[in-house]
Image (tube, rainbow, N blue to C red):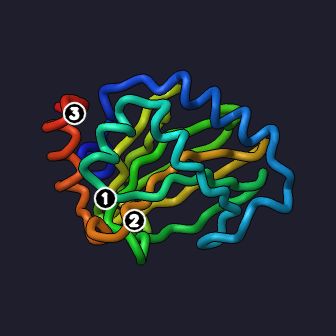
Amino acid sequence: MSDMCYKKVQHTAYPLRSLLWELISATEPDNWVPYYNFMALPIPKEFVKEDPFLQKLSERRDFQAGLLKIPPHTVYNWHVDTDRNCGLNMLVYDDGQSKCIFAPEGMKIVMPTVELRYAPNIFYAFNTKVMHTVINFTTPRYMFSLEFMGKDYGLTYEQLLADLKELGYGS
């Protein structure tokens, strides 16, 4: 059931994650901007060149990369994304005290759920059209996220998975 919600990308992004943490540490708080109830920081295009997987994906797809910040003791309520069909995410930092949970059968009083347990330095294709929530507990949570733009604005989760496979980063 997890494959309909998310898919691990077969790539380790250690150098990029370190660069992103440096960017977070060096950014003044007022440089973060509101974006869909998150605080967001656009990622410079040069960062994409630091990661071979993102570089290959950028040759095929138009996207904007950004960091999303969720404060401690915050729930981003159950939802499906309204302006994108899929995304590509990597957890940059949390203290192990946050959860991303999907409800693949929709909202019910009692419902099955699927948790995405982010592994360090790993990207995940993310099906934003499956109901999901984020619960963050004790420290700020920082997420790298791609949003497909321009000609690729309507990219579907299935198309993204096909791209990953064709590029050698999916199964």
Q: Where residue 170 is drawn, which disc sits there?
A: 3
Question: Quick one: quadrant of the C terminus?
Answer: top left
Residue 76 horizontal side relative to residue 130, left or right: right
> What residue did someone put label 2 on?
131
Of 77 and 49, which appears nearest the observer? 49
> What residue did someone put label 1 on?
104
Number of other residues with Cα within 10 Å of mark 1, as a class: few under 14, some 14 to 19, many 20 or more: some
Q: Report the amino acid beneath label 3.
A: Gly
- Residue 81, by quadrant, is bottom left
Whether residues under marks 1 and 2 lie with C-beta atoms below 8 angstroms apart, the answer is yes
Q: Nearer the viewer, mark 3 or mark 2?
A: 3
Q: Report the amino acid beneath label 1.
A: Pro
Mark 1 or mark 2, which has the lower sequence index?
1
Q: Is residue 43 above or below residue 25?
A: below
Q: Is residue 1 above or below residue 107?
A: above
Q: Secondary structure at mark 3?
A: loop
Whether residues under marks 3 and 2 lie with C-beta atoms below 8 angstroms apart, the answer is no
Q: Is residue 102 above or below residue 171?
A: below
